[in-house]
Image (cartoon, grey):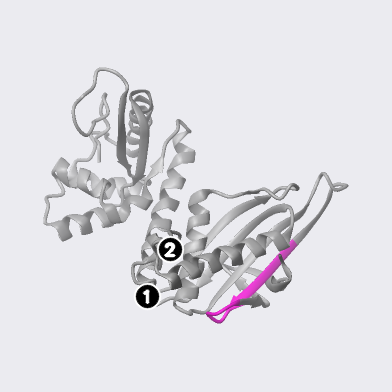
Amino acid sequence: MSRNSRRPRRCGAEPSRRSDEAFVTGILTDEADFARAREWQLTDAPDYDTYLRETGDLLAEAVDGYATVRARMFHPDDFADYCLLHGVDPGEQAARDGYLVNPPLQTQLVTYRGEDLADFVPRLVRAREGGLTLRHADLVMDGALCEAATAAADPRVRWTYQQASEVFRRMLVGAGCGAYEFRIAVDAPGGPLEAHARVLHWEDGAVRIHDEDLDLITAVLCAGLYGELPGAAVLHGTQGSGAVCGEYQQVAWAWRSTGFDWTPAELAVDGVPAGPGFSLGTVV
């Protein structure tokens, strides 16, 4: 983790002008984590408010000095586990740098583009949660998740990925235009696999969803189909468009999976109740 200093730390030589290298840092996302991390002297800030202000300055300088700026949530438990596993001293800069770029945790990195820190920090928290879910899904799929969408993947894994993508596509197409929230939970070994996302479906058929959310939902669907695990999904929100006479209605649809396919059901996911959804077999 780069300390909050007047000049961002770089991996490699210090260039005299804007660097083509990427700048990577870790950010403590709440006051409790800040207090727990004091023993490692990650920052000279006397309190969390000062730490956030200095972190904002650090990121602003990095945006000016680097082509790419990325950050991840610096989680004390994750860092302690990393140091124990690799036998490194948590007080050393090398331990922090290694933790930040640890390959199994790359999915937790989020690109920073100059937004307010108050908006950026929650994305880091979600990225960590999503990264842990992706690792869990990958274990369920015997380590094949990262290859699922490639031509080189095992035929069964590739078919599973295609099926998962098709299930989600049919749910969105069948719902029609509107603003929705999608929630899915799959009963997996080691605990439930869960994902959720906000979805905008425009009148012209275009769908807006964050890439990381789409990846997470597809991974959970993949793991459920691959492991033949039971699951549940809810799509709820406002259906309709201002372009169609301004007609809107609140909807909440649900589906259940026995591990092989998804069928309409009345249930709740994350406390959101819903009635039986439409049959996915009727959607083209």
Circle count: 2
Residue 152, given in percent of the width and then of the height, sits at: 39, 62
State which quadrant residue 142 falls in. bottom left
Residue 148 numbered mark, or none:
2
Residue 193 counted in the magenta span: no
State which quadrant residue 172 falls in. bottom right
Q: In which quadrant will I find the N terminus? A: top left
Which residue corresponds to the image point at 47% horizontal and 38% vertical from the top-left?
118
Residue 82 numbered mark, or none:
none
Q: Main secondary structure of the magenta part?
A: strand
In the displayed structure, does residue 135 sit left or right of residue 85? right
Q: Is residue 190 above or below residue 150?
A: below
Q: In which quadrant will I find the C terminus? A: bottom right
Residue 192, given in percent of the width and then of the height, sits at: 45, 72
Residue 256 counted in the magenta span: yes
Say what secondary structure mark 2 lies in: loop
As shown in the figure, which amino acid type bears the numbered disc 2? Ala
Q: Residue furthest top?
A: 16
Residue 167, given in percent of the width and then of the height, sits at: 60, 67
Residue 257, given in percent of the width and then of the height, sits at: 58, 78
Q: Which callout, 1 or 2, points at the residue further toward the start of the chain?
A: 2
**Number of residues whose C-alpha sits closer than 10 Å to that of mark 2, classed few (under 14), some (14–19) or many (20 or more):** many
Q: From which residue to which does the magenta span run? A: 251-261
- Dot in front, 1 or 2: 2
Which residue is tagged 1? 190
